[in-house]
Amino acid sequence: MYQTIMLKKDGRLAYLVLNRPDSMNAMNAKMMGELAHCFESLKNDSSVQVLIIYGAGRAFSAGGDIKEMVDPKNPMNIDVVMGDVSRLAKALYTLPQITISAIHGASAGLAFSMALACDHVVAEESSKLAMNFIGIGLIPDGGGHFFLKERVGVPRAKQLIWAGQVLKAHDALAKGLIEEVTAEGRGLEQAEKYAYEVLASPVSSMLKSKEILHGQKLAELDEVLAGEASGQSAMRKTADHIEGIQAFVEKRKPAFKGE
């Protein structure tokens, strides 16, 4: 059914696998659309109570597919893409399942926004976590502003966005961004351990609390997603973004001018 992701079910537990391992699961337009569709379909699936999200191969996900951004033969339609990004973020946040992200390798940009949207984040100690849109002159999307603020508050969220630094798992844990750090190669195993603990709990009670706590934030999330969509479209047209992309492709330090 899907080309860039896989959805596997095992009783009340489901696994969503980001499945572009040759590209470190970089999120192209196809994957963003498929993720949005998958999350929306899970909203109506009462048979699943826990969802684990992880990446195939060497990484959770390197974030947005920069190669596709600069492909002259098939340019990315930013407005369509941002529509799918907003859909996937809202659907993920409102899922009637306990969501767990199991991170190994890189989790950057949109992928980090998606991980932070989950109810429980497990990261292997060697993983690299980055809200690094600033490096190519962009702003967080996928609800990145909202999910960072929810976890660490506005002042810290701004600093993390503006710095765009790569965090090790223990740093992210200390900052309150994730729930657990585990040994290299044990991320999925640890996520499953937590999933089975949840499944042995009164899950309906847990899900009702999630619904109440998240429900009061939906209007704010909608506002953030609209701001990110229009803001990202505007940032894509800036000289700094063009310079950031060129510098990335040419593997050099960008020379930003604030334009």
Image (cartoon, rainbow, N blue to C red):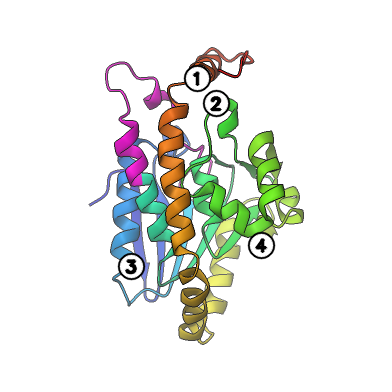
Q: Indicate the amino acid at tag 1.
A: Ile
The alpha-carbon separation of the residues under discs 4 and 1 comes to 33 Å
Say whether residue 242 is left or right of residue 190.
left
Dots 2, 4 in contact, CB < 8 A: no
Magenta segment boundaries in residue numbering: 56-84
Which residue, given by chain and number where applicable, does mark 2 sit on? 137
Task: Point out the image quarter for the C terminus.
Answer: top right
* Pointer 2 or 3: first along the chain: 3
Disc 3: CA contacts within 10 A as few (<14), some (14-19) or many (>=20): some
Nearest to N terminus: mark 2 or mark 4: 2
The residue indicated by pointer 3 is 43
Q: Amino acid at mark 4?
A: Glu
Hey, what amino acid is under mark 3? Lys
Is there a contact, CB below 8 Å, between mark 2 and mark 3? no
Give the mark toward the camera: 4 or 1.
1
Q: Nearer the viewer, residue 44 or 20?
A: 44
Q: Earlier in the sequence, mark 3 or mark 4?
A: 3
Q: Position of residue 65 (x, y in %)?
A: 43, 31
Most frequent secondary structure within the magenta stretch: loop
Element under disc 4? loop
* Residue 31: mark: none
Circle nearer the N terminus (1, 2): 2
> Can residue 252 be seen in this snapshot?
yes
Residue 171 percent across, percent down from the top left: 75, 48
- Give the total number of marks visible in the rendering: 4
Nearer to us of marks 3 and 4 is 3
Residues at badges 1 and 3 in contact (C-beta under 8 Å)?
no
Compute the Cα span from label 3 to label 4: 24 Å
Circles 1 and 2: CB distance less than 8 Å?
A: yes
Q: Does residue 83 belong to the magenta stretch?
A: yes
**According to the image, label 4 marks what residue?**
179
Compared with residue 258, is residue 201 higher up or lower down, i.e. above or below? below
